[in-house]
Image (tube, grey):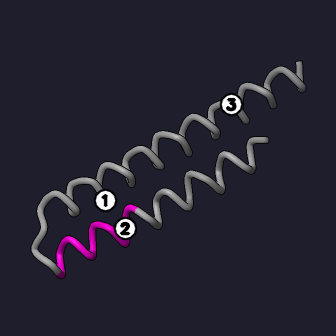
């Protein structure tokens, strides 16, 4: 399940980068902002999944 969440976060990050780049090209500040927001959400999701993995490892090694 964790890998699925990471893949979704990676996809969201790529989508955000593309949207931000499109906003750069078209000069649309809303697209740029939405793309950046998606990237930040993806980073948070990755951090959450990494933390879950660390906690699971600690529990498994206890």
Q: Horizontally, is 48 left or right of 2 in the view?
A: left
Q: Which residues are magenta?
A: 16-25
**What residue sits right under mark 2 in the picture?**
17
Q: Earlier in the sequence, mark 3 or mark 2?
A: 2
Left or right: residue 60 versus residue 52 is right
Q: Secondary structure at mark 3?
A: helix
Q: Is residue 19 magenta?
A: yes
Dot 1 or dot 2: first in sequence order is 2
Q: Which mark is residue 23?
A: none
Question: Crowdedness of circle 3 by 10 Å Cα count: few (<14), some, many (20+)?
Answer: few
Percent position of residue 17, x then y: 37, 67
Task: Tell me the CA gap for discs 3 and 1.
Answer: 26 Å
Count of labels shown?
A: 3
Label of residue 35 in the image: 1
Q: Residue at x 20, y 71 (%)?
A: 23
Magenta stretch: residue 37 in it?
A: no
In this view, the residue in front, 16 or 56, is 16
* Depicted 21 relative to depicted 43: above or below: below
Q: What residue sits 56% from the left and 45% below the top?
A: 46
The quadrant of the picture occupied by the N terminus is top right
Residue 28 falls in image quadrant: bottom left
List x then y, in percent, for residue 55. 72, 25
Residue at image coords 46%, 59%: 13
Pointers 1 and 2 in contact (CB under 8 A)?
A: yes
The crowd level at tag 1 (other Cα within 10 Å; few <14, some 14-19, many 20+) is: many
Residue that label 3 marks? 52
Residue 50 higher or lower than 18, as above or below: above
Q: Position of residue 50 (x, y in %)?
A: 63, 40
Quarter of the rendering occupied by the C terminus? top right
């Amino acid at each position: 399940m964790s890998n699925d969440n990471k893949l979704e976060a990676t996809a969201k990050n790529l989508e955000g980068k593309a949207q931000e780049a499109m906003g750069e090209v078209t000069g649309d500040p809303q697209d740029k902002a939405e793309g950046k927001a998606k990237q930040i959400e993806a980073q948070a999701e990755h951090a959450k999944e990494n933390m879950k993995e660390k906690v699971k490892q600690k529990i498994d090694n206890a």
